[in-house]
Image (spheres, rainbow, N blue to C red):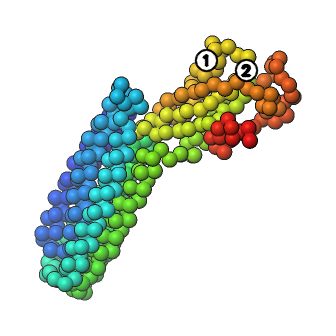
Amino acid sequence: MDKIKLTVQKRIVTISIILFIGKLAAYYLTNSVGILTDALESTVNVITGLVSLYSIGLALKPKDTGHPFGHGKVELLSASLEGLLIFFAGLIIIFEAIKRFFVPAEIQQLDIGIVIIAVAGIVNYIVGYYSIKTGRKHNSAALVAGGKHLQSDTYSSIGLVIGLVLLMVTRLAWLDSLIAIIFGGIIIYTGIKIMKETTSVLMDEADFKIIDTIALIMFKHRTENWVNIHNVKLVRYGNSYHLDCDLTLPWYMNVREAHVEIDHLQEVVKNGYSETVDLTIHTDACTDDLCSNCRKSDCHARSEEFTFELPWNVEQIIKTKKELQE
């Protein structure tokens, strides 16, 4: 699985270099600042592709003493860098376009330029789709971010081709600069969006969708001894997750018995969830106020009859012990 991510990124880098050379040739043939916008963005594709390739390789390194949770977060740093470079590429594009408003240049051989940009756009979309699909399957932030960037290239290429056709028909030089400004703005938006998404993960923002999925798995395989689960925290490290939780067990269980329940819970989560999950489980002793929600049938310490079972949804399981008692 890990080798697949590395192979995919190598292919993306190779294709990005070929497309960059093609767009650069199109710019020199046409002298269009609109086409320059695509060429500049392709420069970012090549740079970030190489950075992503390095980061994916580093992320695949196993855990060690200095990195007990692995090296997975380096992929997020790579994706953040990609967003930053895209943002600055957009600023440069807009600057060049505004400059062309005041110093127009003669546009040549637009027909050839249009063909090159159109073909590059189609290739970018296919490669972007492949990158996103692989990234989501194998939990690679770098591949997903790179794929979204490549697909955003396609959308901008479609608009660019339309604009270049209009420019070829009308011969209005200012259209070239206008096209570049519009797509410079789109590129800036894409960069900001990528940075926002990766920063939230770097800041360990809770992913309630995944927590809810794991909660359903635990509830489905719940044993009578699992009185309650709470204080659940989930952190992502590259293509794996680390989950902390508190498992409430009958107060009279000994350490060996409690350990059997912990091992069983770990097995349930790891077998039930397709991604890699490391669990750290703390045990709590049950109290009398939980008897009405405990379904253990042979409990000799019960002070109250079982009435109903508390749901194990996100709102319930992320609460601390103090919050549950309030």
Residue 103, position in %: x, y?
A: 16, 83
> Which SS class for mark 2?
loop
Give the quadrant of residue 37. bottom left
Q: At label 1, which amino acid type do we have?
A: His
Indicate left or right for 112 with 236 as reference.
Answer: left
The residue under the point 38% across, 55% down is 195
Q: Quadrant of the N terminus?
A: top left
Classify 302 as above or below 71.
above
Classify 260 as above or below 218.
above
Q: Earlier in the sequence, mark 2 or mark 1?
A: 2
> Which SS class for mark 1?
helix
Q: Quadrant of the C terminus?
A: top right
Residue 26, position in %: x, y?
A: 17, 67
Label 2 sits on residue: 251
Camera-side residue of 33 and 299: 299
Camera-side residue of 162 and 226: 226
Camera-side residue of 266 and 281: 281
Q: Crowdedness of circle 2 by 10 Å Cα count: few (<14), some, many (20+)?
A: few
The residue under the point 32% across, 47% down is 78
Q: At label 2, which amino acid type do we have?
A: Trp
Q: Which mark is residue 259?
A: 1
Indicate left or right for 288 with 225 as reference.
Answer: right
The residue under the point 41% across, 59% down is 193
| Residue 261 appearing in the image | yes
